[in-house]
Amino acid sequence: MINRDTNLGNDPPAGFVVAVVDDDESILRSLGDLLESADYTVWLFRSATALLDTGRLVEIDCVVSDIDMPGMDGFDMLRLIHAKRPGMPIIFITGYPQRFNAPPLIPGGVVPRGFTKPFRAEDLLAAVGDAVRNTSSE
């Protein structure tokens, strides 16, 4: 995990926590910068396994993830996250729009939101904002 939040001790971070998962370092960092510019606490992970191995899913409000990554892909990660945290919002990004043709079946009928690269920064920020507002109001 690449952590940019200075408050990862015992105290919960202020505001919403967004985890970003991508094996491409430049995309990972640019998404982190974008979300930090909107005042989110951002945790960066180079793989789905790295995110899942933290044991800190309960502290995360939203996940933004690539779909195609070595090891575990985004859809498998989504299934594992929803087994532990049903309803956690996950927003996918991909360079392959055909990946959205058959979204995974998630218990409860959850269909993840998705963006094809390149996408507009303001669209992603709006989707994350909607996701965390909807989750916090439940």
Image (spheres, grey):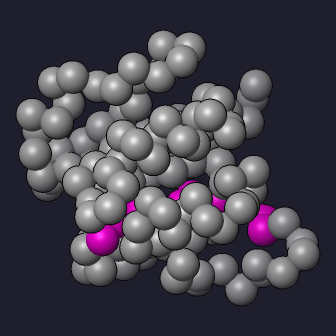
Residue drawn at 48 percent across, 63 percent down: 49
Q: How far from the left and from the top, in percent, is residue 75? A: 36, 40
In the image, residue 87 sits, relative to residue 119, either above or below, namely above
Question: Where, quadrant-wise, is the N terminus in this rendering?
Answer: bottom right
Say whether residue 18 is magenta: yes
In the image, residue 116 sits, relative to residue 37, either above or below, namely above
In the image, residue 64 sits, relative to residue 14, either above or below, namely above
Residue furthest out toward the front: 71
Residue drawn at 40 percent across, 42 percent down: 76
Say whether residue 54 is magenta: no
Asked if residue 49 lies left or right of residue 14, the reply is left
Q: How far from the left and from the top, in percent, is residue 120? A: 23, 51
Residue 40 seen anywhere in this rendered image of the structure = no
Count of picture labels: 0
Asked if residue 100 lies left or right of residue 82, the reply is left
Q: Which residues are magenta?
A: 13-23
Residue 59 seen anywhere in this rendered image of the structure = yes
Res 30 quadrant in image? bottom left
Q: How far from the left and from the top, in percent, is residue 129? A: 53, 43
